[in-house]
Structures are given as structure tokens and as C-alpha cells.
Amino acid sequence: MIALIDYGAGNLTSVRKALSAVGADYFTPAAPEEIGDVSGLIVPGVGHFGATRALTAAWRTAILGVVDRSVPLLGICLGMQYLFEGSDEAQDASGLGLLPGRCERIPSKVKVPHVGWNDLEVVRPSRLLRDVTGGVMTYFTHSYAAPVTDATVASTTYGSSFAAVVERGNVFGVQFHPEKSSQAGLSILRSFVQITRSPDRPITRC
């Protein structure tokens, strides 16, 4: 069973619909203690990084505990940014620190926010992207982005190059919205669901 975290940062209807379409079993926990025995965890979200403050210390402890038990974690859009140390959008709000680096604003030489379809440049093999080819288009809507690091498995260029997909051990993230990215997005969600069902999951606390 996958726990879909709702912390008030966006409507989860489309995420739930996409998860149902790929055959996932999921629920939305009302309290941190409800994620103690899950097979996967998804942290979605849209909007301002400050919204992550709604995830209290108890939630943070529970999420990090899930990661320590080798349970796969997927961050979507704002949820992916939350995997990092923080964001310049809300400098007093800490990320989970599972991946190194901070998110920065997209350069003003292009229209911000970035809303629309962009292609993925796959830079290394990935379990999450195993059924996706480079150049596939996915749907973005954001003003801040994560840096390209050794955790990046696919990047996108809009004003500058930034991480579009990250993967390290059992920690995954996508800056775009797979639930709004047609068949490519569903393929990525399907891969994550398959990963949660695999008995061989690497333990990674980044």
C-alpha cells in the first residue's frame, strides 16, 4: 500500500486518478503514525515551498523513518524540491535533506513560472525511467528548480538546465507532473509502483 501525503499543497484528485489507472493500491494518511507499514510513499505538491512547513516534525520523522527502512519515496514537483536541503523560495523552511543542494529560481531571462511541456534529457540509466526514452515530453509548472547533481537521471533546459528526474537508492523525484504528462507520465508512475512491489530495494539515506 502506497501512502499519498496530503499537506494542503494542491489538489490530489489527478494524482489519485493516475495511481488508480496504473493499478496502485494507495491511501491518504491522516496522521504520521499511519505510514509505519507502507510499501511506498509519495509526496506531491504545487505552489510555494513554504507550504512544506505543514509537514511538522512528526511527519518529517515518520517520512525519514520510512526511507531508513528502504521503502521507496517519490516526490512530485514541490515534493521533489522537498527532497533537497531547502529552497531560496522560503529560506527559513528546511527540506528533508535526502539529496544535497538547494532549489533556486528559474532565470528571469525566460517567462516565470515555467508552465508547459518540455523534453527530458536522460543522462544515466534509471529504474524510474526504464520504460521512457530520452526526448519524451512531460508537463511542468514551477518557478524554482533543483540543481543538476550526481542524483540527476534526467534534466530539462528552460532558461538554464535543471534536474527533472532524480534518483538515488530508494529516493526518487520528478519536477514535472506525471499525472498530467499523458502516457509517459503514467509509465513513470507505473515503474514506481513496480519498484514498491520489488523485494530487492536498496537502502539509501542520502
Image (tube, rainbow, N blue to C red):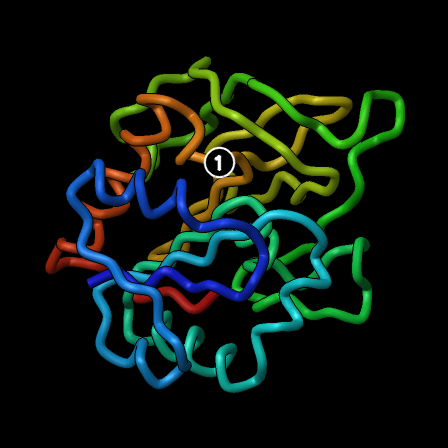
Q: Amino acid at mark 1?
A: His
The residue positioned 80% from the left and 71% from the top of the image is 92
- Secondary-structure class at tag 1: loop
Image location of residue 61, percent across then percent down? 48, 83
Question: In which image quadrant can residue 128 be found?
Answer: top left
Q: In this view of the protein, which residue sits in the foreground, 142 or 191?
A: 142
Q: Residue at x 23, y 38 (%)?
A: 190
| Residue 71 falls left or right of residue 204 | left
Q: What number of labels is visible? A: 1
Residue 36 position (above or below residue 115): below
| Residue nearest the observer in this picture, 77 or 146 | 77
Q: Give the left or right position of residue 75, taking residue 88 as reference.
A: left
Compared to residue 45, the image places residue 96 above or below, namely below
Q: Residue 77's spot in the image, x, y percent?
A: 55, 44
Q: Residue at x 74, y 56 (%)?
A: 87
Residue 49 image position (x, y, % from top left) = 70, 57
Q: Residues within 10 Å of mark 1 (few under 14, many from 20)?
A: many
User: Quick one: which residue is furthest to the right in this view?
Assistant: 108
The single residue placed furthest to the top in the displayed view is 135
Q: Is residue 101 left or right of residue 132?
A: right
> For residue 57, which quarter of the picture?
bottom right
Judging by the rendered image, the residue that carries numbered circle 1 is 177
| Foreground residue among 181 and 94 | 181
Residue 24 location in percent, x, y? 19, 49
In the picture, the quarter occupied by the N terminus is bottom left
Residue displayed at 68% across by 41% down: 145
